Amino acid sequence: MRHAVGAISVLLAIGALPALADQLPAACGGVGAKSYTPPLVTIPAVVLDRGTVITVTNATMAINGDTSSVAALVANPGPDGISLQEAVMATNSDPGTWNIQFAPALKGSTIVVDSGFAKGLTFLTGGNVTINGDIDGGGKPDITLTSLSGATTIFVLSGGNTINGLALQNCGICVEVQRPSAKFQLPAVTGTTFSNITISNLVFSNIQYAGIAFSPDDTSSALVTGNTWDHIQITGNTITGSESGPLLGIDLGLSDAGDTLQHTTIANNNIVLPMPGAGGISMNFGSGLGSTNNQALDTLIANNVISAAPASFGIRLATGVGSASANLIDGVQVIGNQIGLIGQTASANELGIGINVVSGDAASDDEYPSLRPIQYSENNIARNIDILSNTIGEAGGFGIFAQAACCGNSNNTIDNLSILGNTLTGVQLMGGASGGFFSRPSTGNRLSNVLVQANTIHSSVLPGNPNFNLDAAVASAGITVIAGWAEPGNSVNRIWIANNDVNTAFIGIGIVGGSGAGQGPADPPSLADNNVVARPQIFCNQIDQLPTLGVAPGSGINGINVTAGFETASGNQVLQVRVENNLIAGALSDASFFANLGDGASGNSISGSRVSVPVSCDPPTPPMPPKNGPCGRRPL
């Protein structure tokens, strides 16, 4: 009863008394994740029965056979038969299509890859080699690779390779895909396409840095290489860590110039990372000084189970990191993943991110504080990203967090982002934001054509600090949209928020043009001025309760709140806002609207329509028509 009275008192301040209701208009359709049907996901089958079979018959690293060719090794294997090391060396000497298997008698064997004279397993340079450690076809590893020195790494330096059914222990990085270069005493490769690399059904343990890493070059400054990796598949792997590592489960990155990664599938992996701050699946395209014109095209991340410690992230998509510019992510589907916390319960100081999308993240002063002039991450683009039907447990305030740029970076873009059918703890969307070293304002960044529809958001109060102030309340809605957080001249353009079921003691849905925030004494001032949220459409949402955290009963702030400028902010605009047919705490009601809110806000403005009209997409023009619910469905 108290909520109903609060809703009426708020709405009297902005318009006519709403009719009490217990449901949305029938034209709205359903709300929440249960109302959304995700697309079918097809994971390519792993092909293991290709190529001429080479049978490994001993569990050593001995080299006493003739490895000049596969035929020579089979004819002259040495007194102890064929070792894995000999088999790989022979395929490198004799390019073809080869299938390295293990004799049934070796089931359950462990191979110490740095035993004898070996420093580790020979690099795969010949291409088109399958190494299959699943002897009995049971879908689990029957062969273990380990080391005494932490050198259990399989280096894949060629295309067409499949690594399947092995258990790998004691790794810095267990499987690493790179290009041939002087690092491996090989001629550097540029302008080359590496196709069809599969890493499947492996089991990793005792890892220092990463289970699987795709890092074509790890030099300190980017080289112009122009290589392409096509059809990379990482499926069915189990990565188990401890509180000391790994830092990353699956790490994919491009740090050179002009490289392309396309048609990538990361699916059905089980990743457990107890280390605080670790990440499940990390994709950084364009990373570091001089890293430009890289692109990631057509990526599927589906049906992975990621359990991470507090302050960790589940899945991260980033373009333009640490001064990298003009990089592109185009076409990513993140579908049906399950992400949750393990270990101790998250506190106010241990918040993680379930799924993170960022463009223009960090400048050179992040990794190189003394470098002058500072190099910035500019003109990066992440577009055509679908985040569909994922389940994200308590990831703190950010179940899904998308940010066009931070940290002094400018002119970065996230475009055509769909967030549909997810069950999670909150969504936060930002244009430009402060963060890191505040070396200059983050400006000219844009988040555009965003659809947030049919999600179930049930934020709970995390232990640690239950005393939230108004600043925290405005920035912590169940669905939060901020064009500029302590930064000027950024925008959010065209966003649909529809058919969501939001149950939180925070504000349910919050739109903010510019949000001012105090910065440290060593940081230059950067006011949240002249930001724009244009054409936000908010309709057919169900907000289950009025806000109680950080919001005074007489503040006039409703379950849906639109603010042009908050705190030290001026010249911000919310343009052509439309809010209608939303159910807030049991009543069909309007939002609260503040041109200026908080101390120091002035000269901000809101324009738009709040009249009741038939539900429509208003208008669903390309490239971003809504996909589901009352607005129809856009094919993926």
Image: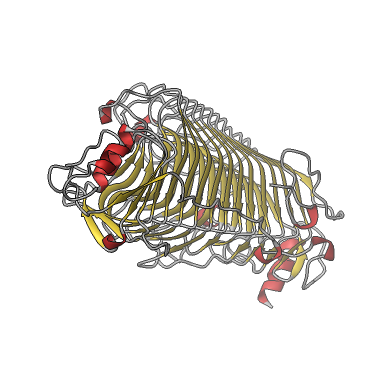
Q: Residue furthest right?
A: 614
Q: Residue furthest front?
A: 75
Residue 326 position (above or below residue 5): above
Q: As rendered, which of 202 and 81 lies closer to the eye?
A: 81
Nearer to me, 214 or 346: 214
Q: Is residue 512 left or right of residue 166?
A: right
**Residue 84's spot in the image, x, y percent?**
26, 47
Residue 123 appearing in the image = no
Residue 254: where, in percent of width, then height?
A: 43, 34
Q: Nearer the viewer, residue 331 or 413?
A: 331
* Left or right: residue 307 compared with residue 562: left
Q: Is residue 228 visible?
A: yes
290 with respect to 8 (left or right): left
Q: How many numbered circles does the render carry?
A: 0
Locate residue 23: give its quadrant.
Answer: bottom right
Residue at screen point 65% across, 63% down: 33
Rendered position, 624 above or below 200: above
- In the image as oriented, which residue stretches furthest toward the left? 116
Q: Residue at horizontal 63%, vertical 60%?
A: 508
User: Which residue in the rendered view is the most extreme toward the bottom?
Assistant: 1
Q: Position of residue 368 (x, y in %)?
A: 31, 31
In this rendered view, identify the residue nearer to me: 550 or 635: 635
| Residue 599 as seen in the image, left or right of residue 369 | right
Residue 305, percent from left and from top: 47, 61
